[in-house]
Amino acid sequence: MLKGKVAIVTGSTSGIGLGIAKELGKLGAGLVLNGFGEAGAIEALRSGIEREHGVRVVYDGADMAQGEAVRGLVAGTIEKFGRLDILVNNAGIQFTAPVEEFPIARWDAILKINLSAAFHGIAAAVPQMRKQRWGRIINIASAHGLVGSTHKAGYVAAKHGLVGLTKVVGLETAGSGVTCNAVCPGWVRTPLVERQIADLAAEKRISQEEAANGLLAEKQPSLEFVALEQLGGAVAFLCSDAAEQITGTAISIDGGWTAQ
């Protein structure tokens, strides 16, 4: 379905981003992976996807906290591939603390990586996508882009901002062949969530399984984690012809979390 298309997926060396990148590669898209990690492990991922799906895969270690680096990632992709069709803004970090104790440096870092990076990437990508008269921008927000939770001031503010940015870009690109949408996952069992489960287990002196179930019971009525393949499938759908008139919207994949 995406043969000949080129996709950037930020924060794609693990977790949600990696799952999405693999799905897009499976559908024939050339890929630019981005994220932190050990060089050998990243090369194994890159070459593995390239070999398995027969698509060109490159890695760019651009720091998402630096606006110019994000814009350079987009420019470098266009230079290497001659085009850019899909931009998935997925990179994100998390920190929890009551608002009065929230470290300023953590607030600034979350806003830079979870929100400003998407702005810089979109601003750099839209001119190329307009020129092609085809483009798909998909922002990986969160259930926390639609509702709040305690102790997550930075994350919730950034993800709400990302949903707002999605609406504006959807309006500005309407009718141009470019769409912009947000995907809002609930709990996904990523390394980030694994750390939250471990912290909860330690705090309450319970098993990891009990902590995971407690996390789900508090927010996600389905009592099941969202699978990486399900998120990848949703992104793939937004890249399809069937989704041509879906733009400026937020799609929840959260087991009923935000329906409550």
Image: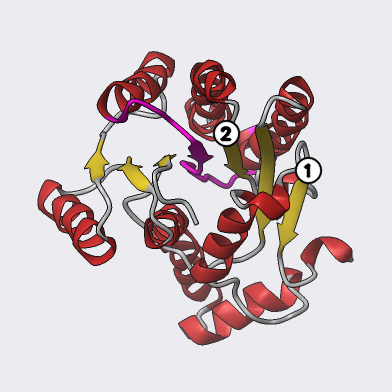
Q: Nearer the viewer, residue 79 or 214?
A: 79
**Residue 240 at x, y = what percent?**
61, 52
Q: Quadrant of residue 34?
A: top left
Q: Quadrant of the C terminus?
A: bottom right
Reply above or below: 78 against 149.
above
- At horizontal 76% and vertical 27% (from top left) the residue drawn is 175
Q: Position of residue 121 (x, y in %)?
A: 49, 25
Residue 67, horizontal then vertical, whole percent: 44, 17
Is disc 1 surrounded by few (<14), some (14 to 19) or many (20+) residues within 10 Å? few
Residue at 74% across / 58% down in the picture?
252
* Local secondary structure at mark 2: strand
Residue 17 horizontal/vertical position (percent): 44, 52
User: For residue 133, which numbered disc appears in the image?
Assistant: none
Mainly helix, strand or loop, the magenta region? Answer: loop
Q: Nearer the viewer, residue 170 or 199?
A: 170
Callout 1: SS: loop
Query: Which residue does the numbered mark 2 point to in the structure image?
Result: 135
- Total labels drawn: 2
Magenta stretch holds residue 86 = yes
Q: Establish if 145 lies above or below 207.
A: above
Dot 2 amino acid type = Gly
In the rendered structure, the answer to whether residue 21 lies left or right of residue 46 reads right
Can residue 183 be seen in this snapshot? yes
Three-letter code, disc 1: Gln
Q: Alpha-carbon neighbours of circle 2 within 10 Å: few (<14), some, or many (≥20)?
A: many
| Residue at image mark 1 | 245
Looking at the image, residue 236 sits to the left or right of residue 162; the answer is: left
Of the image marks 1 and 2, the number of the one nearer the N terminus: 2
- Residues rendered magenta in the picture: 81-100
- Quadrant for residue 26, please give it: bottom left
